[in-house]
Image (tube, rainbow, N blue to C red):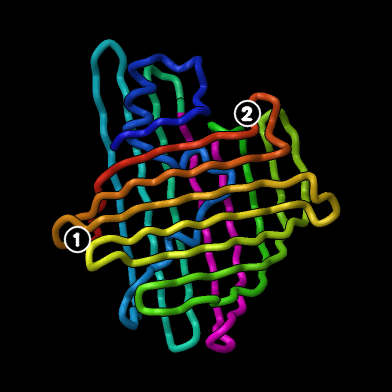
Amino acid sequence: MLLFNQNIPLAMKPFSLIIILFLLGQSMYAQIVNIEDRRTTFTDSVGWYENLDVGFSFSQNKKSVSTLHGSFQIEVHQKKRSFLSISQFTFVKAGGERFVNQGFQHLRFTRELSSKFSLESFGQIQYNQLIFIKLRALAGGGLRFHLVDKKKEKVNFGLSTMYEYDEEQGDVSRDDIRMSTYFSAAIRMGENAIISSTSYFQPLINKMADYRLSTETQLRVTLLGNVAFINTFSLTYDSRAPEEEVNTSYNLTSGISYVF
């Protein structure tokens, strides 16, 4: 996996930084967790989908570096209802110093009302040491509009309202009500390639100038069976980032994926 990221703490030692970047990918810096691109896409009447990824590594040279990471996704479809659960965590420790500690749990329920739109409800808990989030808890719901629903093309638009509670480092806490909108599109190109893109816009209800913006575009090319090459570019902007954090960050990630 190759990764370039503008928003990297400069105090990290080069050796440990290389290991962290190699192992983590783009999700560790995300202010907004992109759930839309994790849904199963272009499947034939999928009733049950699950994916498990767990890894541990330890190395010892001048310093010891230990890494533990894992993710688990389960998605269930029953006629006009669907349930999605995504769990993810990453922990990296080098030379007795903890560099990365991040994870989230997301739950989402969707009820199709017609071929044009669905009702959604969701909840999420997140923590991320690198972007100074001790705890972020949110819950909300809204509508999902199916603008295009063809065999090789999917376009959706979501409009929700959510309550959000944040605890940041330095004993700063706040609770807000935000609007959450997203626009997603996925196109299958031939039999082996899919390009998808999702953009989120999350302003405060009572202060539109306070917002988060995130966009992610991914190219997935199946190489052999369940093995695929993935290339992803993502960009996030937070108008109210902590003082230690820059407002804008971006990532370019390339890697290999295997789905069981």
Please give the residue where the numbered disc 2 appears in the rendered image: 246
The answer to whether 87 is drawn above or below residue 189 in the figure is: above
User: What amino acid type is highlighted by mark number 2?
Assistant: Val
Image location of residue 215, percent across then percent down: 54, 49
| Amino acid type at mark 1 | Asn
Give neighbour class at mark 2: few <14, some 14-19, many 20+ (Cα, 10 Å). Answer: some
Q: Seen in the image, is 89 located left or right of residue 225?
A: right
Q: Which residue is drawn at 31% across and 41% down?
A: 254
Could you say where residue 216 lies in the image, as x and y percent from the top left?
Answer: 48, 50
Q: Which residue is drawn at 48% across and 74% down?
A: 83
Q: How far apart are marks 1 and 2 (CA)?
A: 38 Å
Front-lying residue, 100 or 188: 188
Element type at mark 1:
loop
Q: Which of marks 1 and 2 is nearer the N terminus?
A: 1
Q: Which mark is residue 226?
A: 1
Tell me the SS state at disc 2.
Answer: loop
The magenta span reads 100-128
* Residue 130, position as x, y percentages in the image: 53, 31
Kindly check if marks 1 and 2 are in contact, taking CB atoms under 8 A apart as contact: no
Q: Nearer the viewer, residue 18 or 251?
A: 251
Q: Residue furthest front?
A: 190
Residue 21, relative to residue 74: is it above or below? above
Mainly helix, strand or loop, the magenta region?
strand
Q: Which residue lies furthest to the top in this view?
A: 62
